[in-house]
Amino acid sequence: MKKNVLILSGSPRKNGNSELLCEEFLRGADEAGHEVEIVTLFDKKINYCKACYYCEEHGGTCAIKDDMAEIIEKISGADVIVLASPVYFYSICAQMKAVIDRCVAKWKEIKNKEFYYIMTAADTGEGVMDCTLECFRGFAKCLEGSVEKGAICAKGVYEKGEVKNTAYMNEAYEMGKSIS
């Protein structure tokens, strides 16, 4: 069955390691016959949630007028959501956190999604991605019917493009291709 796959790339570097893995995931999912789109968060204007709860009183419409309304619609329409972020101080990047927080406007309507996570870090230590993964899982846990389908923890990649010569590239491709 053809699925609508949305990849949210939090990488602030064009052709950075996280973004390269997103492109390989896309290639695999595309070859498997799915509709796939990457949204590069760095290219979008996304302000921070102000916790004003305007959205509660206005049918999920946010008081902030930026690119987030379009992104929430894409999230709502997706069957599969890929969240990708470089690891900064053992957590997700600011661009990804802003998107997650802004989903408060329609979080009750975002249901039955399959989630995949892509994380990259320069560090190779044990547990370096634990907090990042828990941030992603915490978001999905708040959404009814969410199912975690896979995660890539690409350690030891710092320099831009360094991930190209690793097994993580094939892992991302195969994970995308495995969507069923």
Image (spheres, grey):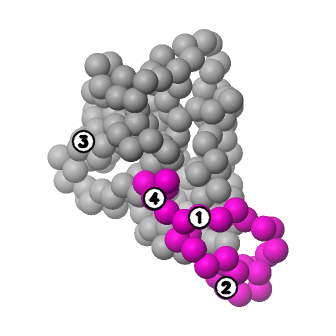
- Image quarter hosting the N terminus: bottom left
- Residue at screen point 32% across, 19% down: 166
**Residue 59: image tag:** 2
How far apart marks 4 and 3 lie (CA) works out to 24 Å
Q: Quadrant of residue 101?
A: bottom right
Label 3's element? helix
- Residue at screen point 67% across, 29% down: 90
Label 2's element? loop
Of pointers 4 and 2, the one earlier in the residue sequence = 4
Q: Which residue is mark 4?
A: 43
How far apart marks 3 and 2 lie (CA) works out to 37 Å
Q: Which residues are magenta?
A: 40-68
**Residue 177: image tag:** none
How far apart marks 1 and 2 lie (CA) works out to 20 Å
Q: Which residue is mark 1?
A: 46
How far apart marks 4 and 1 lie (CA) works out to 9 Å
Residue 160 left/right relative to 139: left
Q: Is residue 14 magenta?
A: no
How far apart marks 3 and 1 lie (CA) works out to 28 Å
In the displayed structure, 43 sits above or below 159; it is below
Check disc 3: other Cα within 10 Å, few if <14, some if 14-19, many if 20+.
many
